Image (spheres, coloured by chain):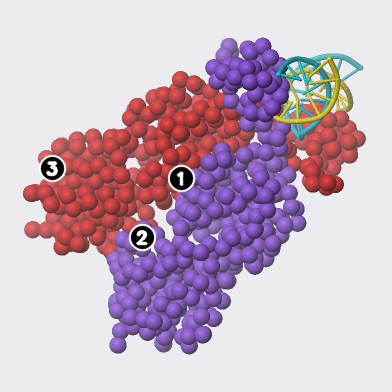
Chain colours: A red, B purple, C cyan, D yellow
Amino acid sequence: MIAAKMRVTISDVAKASGVSNSAVSYALNGKPGVSKATRDRVLDVAAQMGWRPNSAAKALSNDATHSVGLVLTYDTTVLSVESFTTELIAGLTSELEKEGYSLLIRSSRNQQYELGVIKEWIASGAVDAMLVLNVELDDPRITLLKQDARMPVVALCDPSMAGGLPALYDNEQDAAHLIVDYLNELGHIRIARVAGPERLGHTFIRDNAFMEEAAALNMTYSCFHADYSPEQGRRCTERLLSLPHPPTAIVYDNDVMALAALTAAKDMGITVHDQLSIVSWDDSFMCEVSVPSITARRRSVVSQGQHVARMLLDLIAGRHVDSIQETDNELVFRDSSGPLAG
Amino acid sequence: MIAAKMRVTISDVAKASGVSNSAVSYALNGKPGVSKATRDRVLDVAAQMGWRPNSAAKALSNDATHSVGLVLTYDTTVLSVESFTTELIAGLTSELEKEGYSLLIRSSRNQQYELGVIKEWIASGAVDAMLVLNVELDDPRITLLKQDARMPVVALCDPSMAGGLPALYDNEQDAAHLIVDYLNELGHIRIARVAGPERLGHTFIRDNAFMEEAAALNMTYSCFHADYSPEQGRRCTERLLSLPHPPTAIVYDNDVMALAALTAAKDMGITVHDQLSIVSWDDSFMCEVSVPSITARRRSVVSQGQHVARMLLDLIAGRHVDSIQETDNELVFRDSSGPLAG
DNA sequence: TTGTAGGCGTTATCAG
DNA sequence: CTGATAACGCCTACAA
């Protein structure tokens, strides 16, 4: 049992450079209180010995862990929207990295469990801040985080459901208008939408936006709610296309369902583009390479992740943070949509 | 500035229940040294006051953070294999969760930077263990982690490149045989492969496996290396199909490139299935819904994540861990492959 | 069975 | 500018 425990501490460095413990601390942290001569020497010795601050000790002393928390809830949704999760994490971590922050991830099966994780984080100080995804109507997480204001939070949802917490949100209205107007210009009169789970906040927002815009343009609009899975995407498509007056254009809340719709339509002998226009709310590589390729709303989830990270870092630094609306709505026109035939 | 700092500590609980500090600690940790009566009372009071252990203090005292580290390197690879990353994280976190462990993620642009992160983790004790992805030939990370044995590690790569570190690995040979034999039975003589980056360990392993198996069956085999991106998948496909004696079957190292190949072939007027068989090394939802759907090797990345997590937890617990080979190789037959026409 | 005291590594206070 | 000394919250010998 000789080596094993070879961690270099501040006192080791202090001893080796013949100064006091605190002198080393000052030197290492670039704070005043030491002469330039000793500072340089200490820095030198520390580097030589390979000293690195112990994260736990630092965290205990500073009451800051330099990490940001994220709970991934693995119900049907997460794995069906793979690209969202990966891209968000990519954006988050790349921005956090700039300030030396890490992303701490925990897994949860349901919202109840996630509530427990959040409570633990609040009480244990395991993370300096956290973000909340997939906010639902009257989300208990929001309630919890509001009432107990110790934890800096950013919510990824419409401000109307963030309960005053700073939120980063899409301009869903704008996107809905973009899509509905586009379909209207193509001559479509009866449109439909296969939406995400009804309990999700952004589904609710979109529901209203679509309804209003369709009404304003005198279009017939019907909507089925699904769980983002290909199975339900398929089923809803079949149901819609079996209606007495089927829609001539369908908008899907995610790419996976839009893709499933492609085969569903094909199996029913309906030609996408000519007889049926399909638009996806989320763009992804799948929409590009599918046959036909799918017209989709583009947004950069990666940069959304970066923005959230920036907001979180600001909150941690004690700066005031306002809700921010993402503005980059754009429709990418591909083969799955076209003018109403006839 | 009255409330703000309302964290409940062990001494608060001690005071409130009229016993000593250590008695509380014993009681809370289920260790002997307290009477059942006081233990129950302490537990009660602690619950009442909402006590939760401070993670930093605990980490400092126990030299264990209850977290496992993962560095995501965002070169081209990561975002092109989205599904792999998401599924791996899903598997990892769900298994870690069972023991209350978290996944700590940092982001890196290149291997040099990642080396720095690893060194910092080793010296700072920020994670109890870590895993290594995308191992390359003579990977400096492996070297580092081997020479400095303080950090429990599991590598996701062939044992031959894990340098003695415990590894979780696919049976690439078996998978290669599976695919090549299948194509051989269909009557294909000239096959090709669009592989991943040459520097990656598993690419190397697969290269050899394919070459050997093709040779054993007297098949012509050619291979281009790409970066997993759709662009390169497309370009390599075009190059292969423009050869004087083009292959009649092409295997792609990931689903994204296989999908890109679909459109590439179509644009060249080549009918997939009839004139060209396409097989993907990785399965995903995209392979199911594409037109034509793509024959693919199936493996469960989620359960691989769970296995790695299990190995890491074992290592942390001080148990011996051997390298483990995943066995679930299976080929899912879809529309993109078929018997050689003529 | 209980309480006291010291340590984990860092930061911050306060004398000298 | 320097060097003891306490504090952060928890764990664990060691005494009582």
Which type of secondary structure does the marked residue at label 3 adopt?
loop
Residue located at (54% from left, 27% from top): A122
Q: Which mark lies nearer to you, 2 or 3? A: 2
Amino acid, disc 2? Met
Question: Residue B329 at x, y = what percent?
Answer: 46, 66
What numbered label is drawn on residue A5?
A: none
Q: Which mark lies nearer to you, 1 or 3? A: 1
**Residue hosting label 3:** A219
Using the image, name the chain to which the residue with label 1 belongs: A
Q: Which mark lies nearer to you, 2 or 1? A: 2
Which type of secondary structure does the marked residue at label 2 adopt?
helix
Q: In which quarter of the image is residue B28?
A: top right
Between A57 and A319, the one lying in front of the other is A57
**Residue hosting label 1:** A88
Q: In which quarter of the image is residue B1?
A: top right
Question: Residue B106 at x, y = what percent?
Answer: 58, 46
Using the image, name the chain to which the residue with label 2 belongs: B
Amino acid, disc 3? Met
**Residue hosting label 2:** B286
Residues at discs 1 and 3 in contact (Cβ within 8 Å): no
